[in-house]
Structure formats: structure tokens, C-alpha cells
Image (tube, rainbow, N blue to C red):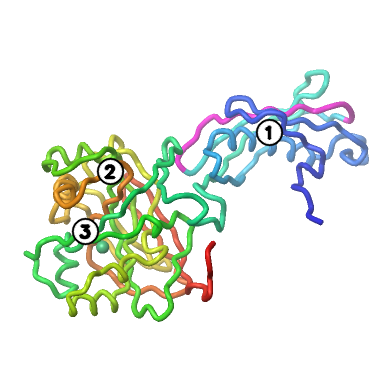
Amino acid sequence: MTTPPFNQYLGVKVERFDPDKSIATLRLAAHHLNRRGVAHGGVVSSLLDSALGAAVIASIPKEWWCATISLSVQFLEGVGEGTLTGTGRVVRRGRRVAFAQGEIRDQKDRIIAVAQGSWHLWPFRPGMQGGESSPHVIVAATGESIKVGKIIGIGRNYAHHILEMGGGAGDAPVLFTKPAGAILHDGGTIRIPPEAGAVHHEVEMVAVIGKRCTAVSREEGIEHVLGFAVGLDMTLRDLQKQARERGEPWAAAKGFDTSAPVSTVTLRDQVGDGSGLRITLDRNGKRCQEGTTSEMIRGVGELVAFASRQMTLERGDLLFTGTPAGVGPIAPGDVLEARLEKVGSLRVEVAAAESGHRGR
Ligand code: ZN
């Protein structure tokens, strides 16, 4: 037997989900009252949490999840009988937080209590990742889900990283791809494949293509970008080194499941052309990669032009634009936090792959 959610257990009924006016009701019974015969504070709070929470839920996409951060209740009147009606509305909604307020009235239309609270918003239910829906990214401002067709990576786009990898600063960029299914969303877990050798983090600005283009110019390139995200180009470094030495493709080194963690997308009109943005990666709270996108040898417009000469780019394609210096190994138990100025942040954990895992 499973216990119903607390508000249902109390008898709270959510009658309407609406960002502007959600409604939850509760018919008072003896077990809701304290010794003085008025509704218990916890009962009143729970009804408000339900009404305000319903407004928040109505304001986010279906697959999103939210949790109450704070709820402040002012109790105005005691009430001992009849049906209480709670209403809630969202007063402000940001990318990861929503503010809501509301009130409870009794049957005589007296205001019993008022409340305001804040809610944390996630793009996904905790623990949910991959497999359950086709690969996609989510636009933070609107919650719109954009299907991802392909993921293109650019190697050798920051001089310092080229040098730390033993290359020459004048080396041409290299283009590689990852399967779209390699996407991992904020809050997910990177699964290190068995016998993978060294696995490295590469924090990168990700450009999301907004419309189809083939062989566009550098100037046109930026116009085809819908927005930006921050991502991690997870790389099996030993395998990549081996492939390089043998002149073999990088597919296995770059394309394992969960090898493309990516944040929500911030639209281009909020970000500009993607230059001059501070980009960082913290591993277990310690800064390990830091740079600005101005250090990129080729800017976003030029990279779109470059990639679009190799293959037609479609709406929803992701372009990983290269990593600044400071790449290094990760291990199970690590927490990685990537940030890109004006764009957003991404937090993922690291674990060993489950063995014998078939399907999802
Ligand atoms: Zn990379």
C-alpha cells in the first residue's frame, strides 16, 4: 500500500490548475481542528501550498518538476467548519524559480490566511534521464522542447587547450559528431563506460541551430543560431589518444551514452553573438577550467559557416564550440558544475556505468 501525498491524505482537492488562478478546496472535518476547535495551522498551510503549487505547476511544461523552497503564511482568522477555498497565482517566473501568492477564504468569504512562496523548477523529474523521450533541449524562457538531430563538436578552438594537448596553435579545427542520444540534462548522471581509461571534462559553449543552412557565410552563420547553452564534451582521453596515433575515428572516444551534458537554452537575443562570455567548470567545488569565449580562435558565426560546409545543419542541431585550457580527469562520485555567463549553468554527477544494463 502506498501512502497518498500529504495534501490528499488531508482531503485537499485541487479543482483547477491555472497560473493566474488555481483553486484548491478542503472540507473541514473534526480531524482538521485543534483543541480549540479551529483548523490546525498545518492544515491551512497545506491547503495554501496546494493552491500556490498548482499555479506553479500550471506555469511550467508537463515534464518539468517543481518543489517548494519557501512558504510564508499569515494567519488572519480562525475557522472551524465549512469548506475552505484556497486560490493561488504565479506573480513571477524566472528560469529556475517561480514566485506565487494566494489566500484562503471560508464559506462566508472571510479571508482566513494569505501566503507567498517560492518554488524551484527543474526541466525533468529527479532521476529521469534519456530514453524516455527523443533527444531534445529545452528553451529556458518558454519551456519549449526542441528536438535534437545531431551533435557536432569542434576540436582545437582555444589556443591554450591545443598547447596542453601537445598540438600547434596554428592547427586547423577538427569536426567530429556525437549521437543525439548522448545528451544528458541538468541534474543527470554521467555514466563512465567500463574499462574506459581516463575520462576528461571539456566545458564548452554550445550553439543551438535555429534554422536549416548549407554552406553559409560567417556573417549569415550567427543568424542561424537560435540560442546558447553550456555543455560538457566528455571525452575518453586514452581512447582518443590511441585513435589519433592510429589515424582512427574518434567516435568511441566522444560518443558514449551521457557524453554530452547540456544545460537549458538561452535565446540569442539575450546573449548576443556569444563572444566575451566567461566560462567555468568546477569539479567538487574546485575551479578547474576557466576562460572567456573571446579566446575562441573561431567565433560562433565562423564555426557555423565551417560546419555548414561539411554538412547541412538543421534546427535543433547542437554545435559544441571547443574547450578552454584545464581539461582533466573525472571519477565516480564527482560533481561537475559548468557555468556560462548570460547563458546558464549545468550540474551533473559522475558514476560508473551499471553493468548488464539492457534498455532503459
Ligand atoms: Zn571538446
Above or below, 67 relative to 27: below
| Disc 3 Cβ-to-ligand 1 distance below 8 Å | yes
Mark 1: few/some/many CA within 10 Å (<14, 14-19, 20+):
many
Residue 184's quadrant in the figure? bottom left
Which mark is nearer the camera, 2 or 3?
2
Q: Which residues are magenta?
A: 80-95
Q: Amino acid at mark 1?
A: Ala
Residue 154, which numbered label? 3
Whole-angstrom CA distance, mark 3 to mark 1, is 48 Å
Residue nearest the viewer, comparing 35 with 44: 44
Farthest residue in the top direction?
Answer: 108
Q: Is residue 85 magenta?
A: yes
Q: Secondary structure at mark 2?
A: loop
Horizontal placement of 180 versus 62: left or right? left
Residue ID for mark 1: 51
Q: Amino acid at mark 2?
A: Glu
Whole-angstrom CA distance, mark 2 to mark 1, is 42 Å
Disc with the residue nearer the chain's start (3 vs 1): 1
Q: Amino acid at mark 3?
A: Ile
Whole-angstrom CA distance, mark 2 to mark 3, is 17 Å
